[in-house]
Amino acid sequence: MTGTVTEVLHPLVQHKLGLLRDVTTTTQMFRQLVNELTLLLTYEATKGLADEEVEIETPLEHTTARRISGKKVAVCPILRAGVGMLDAVLSLVPGARVGFIGLFRDEETLQPVEYYVKLPGDVAERDVILLDPMLATGNSTAAAIETVKRAGATSVRLIALIAAPEGIERVHRDHPEVPVVVAAVDRELNEKGYILPGLGDAGDRLYGTK
Ligand code: URA
């Protein structure tokens, strides 16, 4: 996958996304839906991982099977809302290492401020999956991609739940080779940098901090 945006239109994804957006959805339900949506988006985002044929024994006979080969995965949630997506990826890719990137958005300038970075030592040899539920202005996501690239990563993909067109453009301006997998590309950003129609503040809705 290169430089692509994949909007996953599968009915399960779109059904769950509608529930996620709904203002009456509880925090508990919201967390569960983020987990389920991330599972489904991870399925799509990992489609291009290299695999190889291996020989195995079933209880009945010798046969061949496919096994993921090549690079191992580093999954990197952007704090704090990206953490709500982490368990889903780890349940599908249990051998992945985890890196954390702490960025907050200065609400005045809308520019990212990096306050914490802890990446696997061998991130350069891994396929990086960045997790950021809301690709809004794209400034913090582009900065996070820059951070993992600075650490040597050459294979980076992004899973977001909802993206604004502005965010996709911003990320692909600096990082055109990064594939983006989302449940929806929404209409626009408002003057405060929120995605419309969106779902509000993903971190607040995940952690009940509104
Ligand atoms: N971050 C969010 O949590 N929601 C938005 O709409 C934009 C950025």
Image: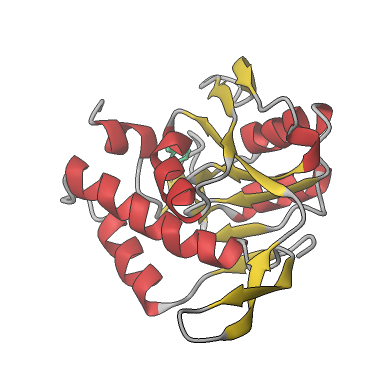
In which quarter of the view is residue 95 placed?
top right
Relative horizontal placement of residue 53, taking residue 111 as reference (left or right): right
Residue at image position (35%, 73%) is: 12
Residue 9 appears at what percent x and percent y?
48, 75
Residue 104 can be seen in this image: yes
Observer-nearest of 83 and 168 = 83
Rendering quadrant holding ligand 1: top left
Residue 117 appears at what percent x and percent y?
63, 19
Relative horizontal placement of residue 169, taking residue 74 as reference (left or right): right
Could you tell me which quadrant the C terminus lies in?
A: top left
Relative horizontal placement of residue 34, taking residue 183 as reference (left or right): left
Residue at image position (50%, 47%) is: 94
In which quarter of the view is residue 108 placed?
top right
Q: How many marks?
A: 0
Could you tell me which quadrant the N terminus lies in?
A: bottom right
Residue at image position (60%, 61%) is: 45
Residue at image position (77%, 56%) is: 70
Residue 112 appears at what percent x and percent y?
63, 24
Reply above or below: 44 against 79.
Answer: below
Reply above or below: 102 against 126.
Answer: above
Reply above or below: 145 against 186.
Answer: above
Observer-nearest of 65 and 43 = 65
Residue 186 can be seen in this image: no
In which quarter of the view is residue 207 placed?
top left
Relative horizontal placement of residue 50, taking residue 94 as reference (left or right): right
Observer-nearest of 27 and 138 = 27
Q: Residue furthest top?
A: 115
